[in-house]
Amino acid sequence: MNKKLPSTSRSLPIALIRAREGAMAPIRDMLANTGITEQQWRILRVLSEHGSLDSTTLADRASLLFPSLTRIAAKMREKGLITQTRDEADRRRQLIEITAKGQKFIDDHAERAALVVVGFRTRLGDDNYEKLLDLLALLDPGPRD
Amino acid sequence: MNKKLPSTSRSLPIALIRAREGAMAPIRDMLANTGITEQQWRILRVLSEHGSLDSTTLADRASLLFPSLTRIAAKMREKGLITQTRDEADRRRQLIEITAKGQKFIDDHAERAALVVVGFRTRLGDDNYEKLLDLLALLDPGPRD
DNA sequence: CCTATTTTATTAATATGTTAATTATTGCTA
DNA sequence: TAGCAATAATTAACATATTAATAAAATAGG
């Protein structure tokens, strides 16, 4: 009567959580003792790639909820990693930009982070790596653009 | 000089986070207004499957850090969903077991949860679904047994 | 022009994630 | 067997996740 649920060892949500832990572990090691968290790293990465972004878009691309972004951005501004400016055309909005200091952090860690990516590509194989990204994209809920 | 990092839109960690959001959304909907969180649901699922477990094994199988489990288990005990008993052979250890009330919650929601699984299998296709689980397992860091 | 609605952002409250420090118990070993 | 390392669990401190409530600004309709 209760054979309906799969074994937790083949549960998709649990597998995703564990895989995320595995994928983030080397990045976490890299960021240890830098004062930059995983989320702050994601924000810097997105800003470095796209330049100036409004908060809503930034939250979406960095996969953060808006209230989290509010707090994290405040701390990053205090640290001098980003700037926040009101959009004068629509004063509800806010534009967030990476500072030279923030960009320097990215530059200083880009090589090591890239090695992490290479490590996973090698571990899975190029085909599997791309296939995995494609399959994950199918589960992606949100509007990316 | 900085072409080393992949676009954030093809970043494995971000893809994993977004996929997890997508995969958990229906479960989150199911649990809304029940007073049971995602993590509590995972704990109940694991306990329902394995019976009585020591805390360390439970934390591993439910993909929770130990300090999180400590807090969550305390609340679940207060709610009458689980019991915690000292291991008399090794008084450092603790055994955690699901109660009838906890099992009833699983039983009451198993059918709907199973439908969620079927939905994802259908959405991805059986082959892709299994392939995805296999690929995710390659990223899994931890000792499962 | 004015108000109801919508959008953007913040704040609040509670729960979890994460690392480090601490406590209690066990095991090992000189 | 006294003392020290290792293990299991808790606690502490801070950061993030999540949902709901609120505030401020813009917009659509009447």
Image (cartoon, coloured by chain):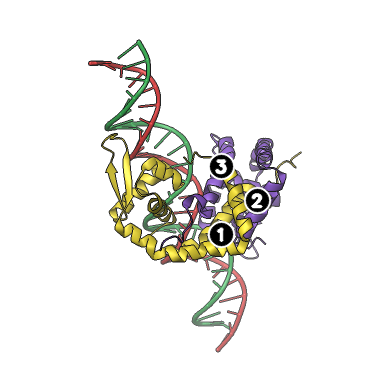
Chain colours: A yellow, B purple, C red, D green
Q: Residue at x 48, y 41 (%)?
A: A144
Amino acid type for the residue under numbered disc 1: Gly
Rendered location of residue B100, percent (x, y) = 67, 42
> How far separated are the C-alphas under marks 1 and 3?
19 Å
Residue B62 in sight in this render: no
Picture disc at residue B22:
3
Q: In this view, does B45 lie to the left or right of A84?
A: right
Amino acid of disc 2: Leu
Residue at image mark 2: B132
Residue A22, label in figure: 1
Near mark 1 (Cα within 10 A), the count class, few <14, some 14-19 or many ≥20, is: some
Residue at the extreme right: A1
Please name the residue shown 59% across and 36% down the image. Answer: B30
Which badge, 3 or 2, comes first in the chain's sequence?
3
Closer to viewer: mark 3 or mark 2? 2
Q: In which quarter of the image is the C terminus of chain B?
A: bottom right
Mark 3 chain: B
- Secondary structure of the residue carrying tag 3 is helix
Is residue A111 in sight in this rendering?
yes
- Which chain is indicated by disc 2? B
User: Which quadrant is home to the N terminus of chain B?
Assistant: bottom left
- Residue situated in front as seen by the camera: A113 or B5: B5
The front one of A29 and B38 is A29
Q: Residues within 10 Å of mark 3 (few under 14, many from 20)?
A: some
Residue in view at x 57 percent, y 62 percent: A120
Separation of residues labelled 2 and 1 (CA atoms):
15 Å
